[in-house]
Image (cartoon, helix red, strand yellow):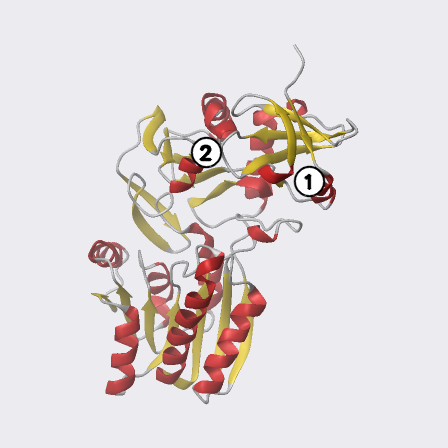
């Protein structure tokens, strides 16, 4: 039986030749395939361009997994997963919680695998990866070794593929609370209900970098589980962690107690309001961390997002002591690095602050950036000094 095929327009072909693995539905001329098939991709002259995951529902209809004469079956799920894990082993990560598989960057489109100690959490975000979950799970158990595999298939993006939002155990048993370590900090993680797969794992290396500069009074805004607050606490006299979620505040307090960080105070509050209050009351900090959620989830939200980033960074610079350090982040892909730098420059000018760039950083190396896929570079982290 012949392999399913998809024929692309010239524009789609050019996109593949430029190294981008996503082809949109508008550039698909013909498809003879079922949902989730691995298809042969050809141009209008019938020339083979490679192989891809096919979706009959998503606007991203084709996700390339092999180029030219290469065949996905030559490595298969087993080979690709083994390569991804070998790369993480080469990094010498000082943590038991980190990303094992990062989608397109590991040549496994729309597949996420995170390790939390003895447990793996998987997200299959397309028809092809969802269909292959039994095979993926078996390979993960064989290669990685684990007590349990949990599928956190609850992201809304799955609905674009016509897939249900579910959470289920695929192998073994997975408790609601899992103990893990990130550098010197121990966490108890809710892998069933927490954000993403339980923790935001992409800031680990940025927290390590920030620890080299942190001192004095620290404000950690949008703290979530207290990642920056807990990592920097032993470098600072006092730490105030702010988050709008009461549940997050309770997690910060519990994790602070678990790690013996008695100088960490966690408080529920709206960061925008709290920053204005600190400015009005004359409260000052020596170190400030701004790690907000994505303000721009689509292009239409960029203008409002820029205003939000400008507001929090302006207020932060006004309450930052001279000689202090601001660690400021954006995880909005639609706000790229040049645009984010422009916002920060504007905030510094309005704050009448002399600001220098100490470090420019991105997501951790276990979340690789694919050079031909700008969408894979989403996390910008700037460490700034105030003169």
Q: Is residue 173 left or right of residue 356?
A: left
Q: Is residue 215 visible?
A: no
Q: Which residue is mark 1?
A: 12
Q: Quadrant of residue 236?
A: bottom left
The residue at which mark 2 appears reads as 161
Residue 200: assigned label: none
Task: From the top left corner, tell me how far across and down residue 5 is, in percent.
Answer: 66, 23
Instruction: Say which of 119 and 341 sits in front.
Output: 341
Q: Residues within 10 Å of mark 1 (few under 14, many from 20)?
A: many
Residue at image coords 55%, 70% = 359
Residue 386: x and y in percent read 47, 83
Quarter assignment of residue 297: bottom left
Counting other residues with Cα less than 10 Å from the Cα at mark 2, is it few (<14), some (14-19), or many (20 or more)? Answer: many
Examine the image and state in which quarter residue 89 appears: top right
Q: Earlier along the polypeptide chain: callout 1 or callout 2?
A: 1
| Residue at x 56% of width, y 51% of height | 375
List x then y, in percent, for residue 205.
49, 58
Measured in 3D between alpha carbons, the distance from the residue under mark 1 to the one under mark 2, in whole angstroms, is 20 Å
Check the image and report above or below for 304 versus 61: below
């Amino acid at each position: 039986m012949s392999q399913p095929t998809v024929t692309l327009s010239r524009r789609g072909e050019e996109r593949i030749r430029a190294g981008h693995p996503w082809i949109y539905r508008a550039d698909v001329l013909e498809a003879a395939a079922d949902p989730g098939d691995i298809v042969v991709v050809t141009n209008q002259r019938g020339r083979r361009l490679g192989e891809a995951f096919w979706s009959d529902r998503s606007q991203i209809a084709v996700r390339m997994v092999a180029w030219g004469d290469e065949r996905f079956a030559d490595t298969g799920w087993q080979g690709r997963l083994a390569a991804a894990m070998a790369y993480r082993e080469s990094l010498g990560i000082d943590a038991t919680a980190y990303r094992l598989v990062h989608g397109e960057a590991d040549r496994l489109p729309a597949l996420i695998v995170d390790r939390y100690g003895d447990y793996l959490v998987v997200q299959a975000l397309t028809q092809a990866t969802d269909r292959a979950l039994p095979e993926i799970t078996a390979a993960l158990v064989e290669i990685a070794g684990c007590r349990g595999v949990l599928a956190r298939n609850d992201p809304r993006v799955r609905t674009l593929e016509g897939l249900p939002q579910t959470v289920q155990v695929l192998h073994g048993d997975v408790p609601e609370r899992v103990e893990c370590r990130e550098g010197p900090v121990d966490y108890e993680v809710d892998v069933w209900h927490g954000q993403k797969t339980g923790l935001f794992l992409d800031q680990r290396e940025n927290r390590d970098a920030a620890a080299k500069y942190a001192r004095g009074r620290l404000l950690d805004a949008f703290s979530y589980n207290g990642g920056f607050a807990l990592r920097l606490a032993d470098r600072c006299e006092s730490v105030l962690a702010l988050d709008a979620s009461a549940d997050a505040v309770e997690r910060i307090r519990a994790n602070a107690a678990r790690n013996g960080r008695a100088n960490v105070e966690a408080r529920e509050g709206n960061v925008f309001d709290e920053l204005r209050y600190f400015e009005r009351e004359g409260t000052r900090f020596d170190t400030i961390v701004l790690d907000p959620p994505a303000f721009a989830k689509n292009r239409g939200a960029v203008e409002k997002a820029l205003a939000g980033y400008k507001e929090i960074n302006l207020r932060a610079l006004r309450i930052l002591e001279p000689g202090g350090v601001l660690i400021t982040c954006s995880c909005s892909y639609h706000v790229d690095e040049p645009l984010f730098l422009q916002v920060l420059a504007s905030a510094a000018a309005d704050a009448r602050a002399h600001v220098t760039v100490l470090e420019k950083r991105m997501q951790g190396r276990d979340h690789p950036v694919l050079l031909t896929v700008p969408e894979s570079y989403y996390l910008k982290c700037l460490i700034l000094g105030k003169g």
